[in-house]
Image: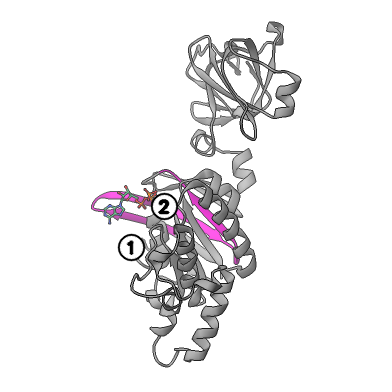
């Protein structure tokens, strides 16, 4: 089932939470909507689910496979919803929770008891909880409860699955393992899914496509790799990971950064911590900085440095790179950006530059 969000706006008491949002999600894709708190992610998801109505613009629509979903009642949309806070029924067992959506179907559509048992058993297996069907929610861990919530959402055989910060309340380790699990699960069931998160790492790891929102607008959407490597705005680059920022000026249509002296405001260079090479030679022309911290525990070596303006800079090196050229506190080094994005008065700029 493909989803098309057409020209959707939403105003709450004069506050515009969504502004003309347009998005196409092809059948079977898992799309992450990413953005800071309050940017409108949940509102958009609730409108797709039918739990909220958009502003009545003439061309506003939510289209499932070429048919307007706005016109169909919520219970006909066949949307599965998983929320951050496990909305499981506490007085029901895991089995009963998963069966709930099937048992409350209108009499004519309701499967037989035998069919319900079979479906729930299949779902318990899918979410790897086969042995826990008789437990109550408060006898489960947070991660297990979210898997039950997912099984319950899948029981009605949704055409679309919507997940609103499903792992937001879990600790980092459980969260990381559940997102990998969700990715595998999605590859098995292939239900078109929208996943809301404010965690960029989670979005980049789980989703086929990433949609970055800011203040009710879509700033950029595309393949996770494309958005990460080619952010189209300073906001997107900043939001998708740590960056070092250098201010500069324009001279004869060239961005000039005066070796990190921050002498202007019109030019901005953003460099990710893993995109620096380090030199010991002043003649390298790099940005001078002093090493103030070296953290070697972890997948990469993390350096903290301070430049001549007192700005703290972050550099990540692979262990191999660090071993070939180890630095320590308080070495003086020169940083050479291997890749960067430059913005001219906020607009992406691809012309010449000198650091
Ligand atoms: P978070 O990550 O914190 O959940 P979000 O991106 O999901 O944030 P939304 O919940 O969609 O953001 O809210 C978008 C904006 O709309 C916020 O400023 C919020 O305060 C406002 N808003 C949401 N629902 C209502 C409501 N029912 N009445 C008034 N304002 C609302």
Circle 2 crowding by C-alpha within 10 Å: few under 14, some 14–19, many from 20: some
The location of residue 241, given as percent across then percent down, is: 54, 36
Q: Nearer the viewer, mark 1 or mark 2?
A: 2
Image quadrant in which the N terminus is located: bottom right
The quarter holding residue 74 reads bottom left
Image quadrant in which the C terminus is located: top right
Residue at 47% over, 50% down: 197
In this view, which residue lies farthest toward the left?
13
Residue at 51% over, 85% down: 117
Query: Residue 62 vs residue 90: left or right?
Result: right
User: Would residue 58 be seen by someone viewing this image from the given angle?
Assistant: yes
Q: Is residue 168 above or below residue 79?
A: above
Q: Which residue is mark 1?
A: 56
Of residue 154 and residue 18, the one placed in the foreground of this image is 154
Of residue 5 and residue 322, the one placed in the foreground of this image is 322
Q: Magenta includes 16?
A: yes
The location of residue 85, given as percent across then percent down, is: 38, 59
The location of residue 66, given as percent across then percent down, is: 53, 71
Q: Is residue 113 above or below residue 268?
A: below
Secondary structure character of the magenta stretch overall: strand
User: Would residue 59 be seen by someone viewing this image from the given angle?
Assistant: no
**Cα separation between marks 1 and 2:** 34 Å
The location of residue 168, given as percent across then percent down, is: 44, 51
Image: magenta residue range = 7-36
Q: Which residue is mark 2?
A: 169
N-terminal-most mark, 1 or 2: 1
């Amino acid at each position: 089932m493909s989803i098309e969000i057409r020209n959707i706006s939403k105003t709450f008491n004069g506050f515009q939470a969504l502004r003309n949002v347009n998005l196409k999600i092809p059948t079977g894709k898992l799309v992450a909507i990413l953005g800071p708190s309050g940017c409108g992610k949940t509102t958009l998801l609730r409108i797709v689910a039918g739990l909220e109505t958009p502003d009545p613009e003439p061309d506003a629509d939510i289209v499932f496979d070429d048919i307007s979903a706005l016109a169909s009642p919520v219970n006909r949309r066949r949307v599965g919803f998983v929320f951050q806070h496990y909305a499981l029924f506490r007085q029901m067992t895991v089995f009963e929770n998963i069966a709930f959506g099937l048992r409350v179907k209108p009499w004519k559509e309701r499967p037989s008891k035998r069919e319900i048992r079979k479906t729930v058993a299949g779902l318990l297996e899918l979410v790897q909880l086969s042995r826990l069907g008789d437990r109550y929610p408060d006898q489960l861990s947070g991660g297990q409860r979210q898997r039950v919530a997912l099984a319950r959402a899948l029981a009605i055989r949704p055409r679309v699955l919507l997940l609103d910060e499903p792992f937001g309340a879990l600790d980092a380790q459980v969260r990381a393992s559940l997102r990998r699990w969700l990715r595998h699960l999605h590859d098995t069931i292939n239900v078109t899914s929208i996943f809301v998160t404010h965690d960029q790492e989670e979005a980049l790891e789980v989703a086929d496509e990433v949609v970055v929102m800011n203040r009710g607008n879509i700033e950029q959407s595309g393949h996770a790799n494309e958005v990460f490597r080619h952010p189209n705005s300073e906001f997107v680059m900043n939001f998708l990971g740590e960056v070092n920022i250098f201010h500069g000026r324009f001279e004869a249509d060239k961005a000039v950064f005066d070796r990190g002296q921050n002498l202007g405001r019109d030019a901005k260079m953003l460099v990710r911590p893993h995109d620096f090479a380090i030199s010991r030679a002043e003649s390298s022309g790099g940005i001078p900085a002093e090493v103030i911290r070296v953290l070697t525990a972890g997948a990469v070596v993390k350096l903290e440095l301070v430049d001549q303006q007192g700005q703290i800079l972050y550099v990540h090196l692979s262990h191999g790179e660090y071993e070939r050229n180890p630095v320590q506190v308080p070495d003086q080094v020169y940083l050479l950006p291997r890749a960067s994005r430059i913005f001219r008065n906020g607009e992406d700029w691809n012309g010449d530059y000198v650091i």
